[in-house]
Image (cartoon, rainbow, N blue to C red):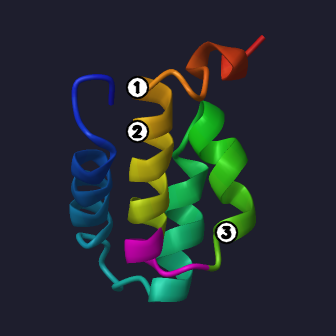
């Protein structure tokens, strides 16, 4: 995901999820998407997994902006 925006990643993931034989309900898509996230995205979005997918994408973009601006340190969330 390092060379794509959060929005691009979310769209790519959603396109793959749409290929499931029995289409997923919106209530299934968002929690599954959160499980694919790592670091600050997962930590900060886990409690909001009940939001709709579009809201999750907006939240992810805000987190990415905070990382890029230096207000949030991504390396603090690296797995130990």
Query: Where, by quadrant of the figure, is residue 22 drawn?
Result: bottom left
Mark 2 in CB contact with mark 1 (< 8 angstroms): yes
- Measured as percent of width and height from the top left, residue 1 is found at 33, 30
Mark 2 in CB contact with mark 3 (< 8 angstroms): no
Magenta region: 51-55
* Image: 35 above or below 69: below
Residue, x 54% and y 63% (percent of image)? 32
| Element class at badge 1 | helix
Q: Is residue 48 left or right of residue 6?
A: right
Q: Is residue 65 left or right of residue 43?
A: left
Residue assigned mark 2: 65
Residue, x 34% and y 85% (percent of image)? 23
Nearer to us of marks 2 and 3 is 2
Residue, x 37% and y 74% (percent of image)? 54
| Element class at badge 3 | helix
Q: How far apart are the two marked residues, 3 and 1, measured between alpha carbons?
A: 22 Å
Q: Was residue 53 drawn as part of the magenta stretch in this picture?
A: yes
First of labels 2, 3 by sequence position: 3
Nearer to us of marks 3 and 1 is 1
- Measured as percent of width and height from the top left, residue 68 is found at 40, 26
Residue, x 26% and y 73% (percent of image)? 18
**Disc 3: CA contacts within 10 A as few (<14), some (14-19) or many (>=20):** some
Q: Quadrant of the C terminus?
A: top right
* Image: 8 above or below 14: above
Residue assigned mark 1: 68
Residue assigned mark 3: 48
**Disc 1: CA contacts within 10 A as few (<14), some (14-19) or many (>=20):** few
- Measured as percent of width and height from the top left, residue 69 is found at 43, 26
- Measured as percent of width and height from the top left, residue 58 is found at 40, 63
Q: How far apart are the two marked residues, 2 and 1, measured between alpha carbons?
A: 5 Å
């Amino acid at each position: 995901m390092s060379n794509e925006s959060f929005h691009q990643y979310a769209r790519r993931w959603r396109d793959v999820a749409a290929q499931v034989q029995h289409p997923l309900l919106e209530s299934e898509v968002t929690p599954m998407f959160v499980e694919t996230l790592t670091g600050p995205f997962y930590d900060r979005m886990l409690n909001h997994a009940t939001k709709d997918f579009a809201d999750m994408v907006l939240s992810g973009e805000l987190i990415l902006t905070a990382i890029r601006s230096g207000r949030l340190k991504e390396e603090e969330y690296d797995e130990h």
